[in-house]
Image: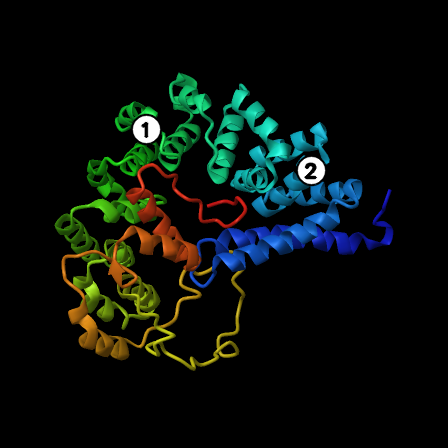
Amino acid sequence: MTSINGYRESFQRFVDDASFLWVLRSIAIKQAGYESSDIQDLDERIDALLDVLILVPDESWALCKESAAIGQAGEIFTTAIIAFRSLDVAKIQFAVDTALAADNAINGLASALAWLPGRLVHSWIKKFLNSKDLNHKYLALIALSLRREDPREYLSVICNREDCIAHALLYSRALRLIGELKRFDLVDVLRTAMNSDVASVKFWAHWSNILLGDYSSAEKLYPYIKTKNPLQEKAIEIAFNVLNIDQAKEWIVQLAKEPKQIRAAIKASSVLGDPQVIPWLITQMRIPELSRVAGEAFTIITGVDLEKNNVALVDLPELDEQFQGEEDNNVDLDEDLYLPFPDADRVAAVWQKYQNRFISGKRYFFGKPQEEEFIAHLLAMGDQRLRRKAAIKLALIRQGSFLMNTAGWRGSSE
């Protein structure tokens, strides 16, 4: 059997690199500036590292176990891939137990279950669904959500068992899956869950109900929209697609009155797509911390690419040396990082020239009325942030179709 012998440091680097690239990928799938081809390139780089590690399974496993001890999702992902590819029950059990014992590491494990071919994971996912441990069921539902595979009767059972309903994370994910997979047979489950006292349960019940075609649930999402919370963005990205335009504009006005909610108001405006908001967006472009997200909203509504059409600022100064100091070790990227800075004066001039091409009170998406064929094109060709928006819109139009997982050609955390 091949051994790493004196190459331990090199193989440790392979483990670290695979874990880091998975983290980078989990961020990139939500970023502007990354296209599906970029995600595929990341996938291929990760696969190449994993293929090298599996050549020396025992030594690689020892390195993975050490790395997994820190309990981070990236390291859990790499460890789980090696474990499941080994077919060794003890290794798989270690990966699962380590992930479930750590905070926020389950997505790395679920991503591994989505990444690997079905022949390696389907039997395990079924075991998790049948497990008495509710955390195992929760893991299985995340993996199936990422794979967009239907658990069939298992989902029905979970949604009607008292112990499962009492497990907020499991129940919420089950409700979310109803919408993602368009399980119309479980609409009564959603109606029951709407009366829950648990905020996340109530949210996902209404979210899925909207995807199943009942737009009245959009009004019930206002509590999640009006204040900053972990579900605010998801509430915005679905509610403003289906709300009555006048009501949607009223909510945007209310958001914009609160300085801390102006960013949310900008995002809501981009989802709604009413060009009447453009002059206000141009005003927000003059505020440094809002400039790029306002520019993005302008592009989403009008289809005007700021850089390609020379209405973005260029030749920004390099001030790294001036601002030397303690480095920020936060792995999360600034969500505006890859967005261009708009030149507000040029954008205003462009809008003054072309605003008569748009009708106030209508919804636009990337410069065109929100029609199925064009949205499908953007889903295929846009960057990751645009693709996520297109996926929601298309799932609302195509009532018989799943909500597409835009995380790329391989399953991943979203």
Amino acid at circle 2: Arg
Residue 398 versus residue 22: which sits nearer the camera?
398
Which quadrant does the N terminus fall into?
A: top right
Q: Which residue lies most toward the front here?
A: 373
- Is label 1 or label 2 in front? 1
Which residue corresponds to the image point at 62% horizontal and 50% vertical from the top-left? 19
Residue 310 badge: none
Between the C-alphas of marks 1 and 2, the distance is 36 Å
Provide the residue designation for mark 1. 184
Quadrant for residue 403, please give it: top left
Which residue, given by chain and number where applicable, does mark 2 sit on? 85
Residue 96 located left or right of residue 338: right
Q: How is the image coloured?
A: rainbow
Name the N-terminal-most of marks 1 and 2: 2
Q: Label 1 sits on what residue type?
A: Phe
Q: Nearer the viewer, residue 13 or 125?
A: 125
> Residue 128: where, in percent of width, then height?
55, 25
Asked if 91 appears above or below 13 in the picture, the reply is above
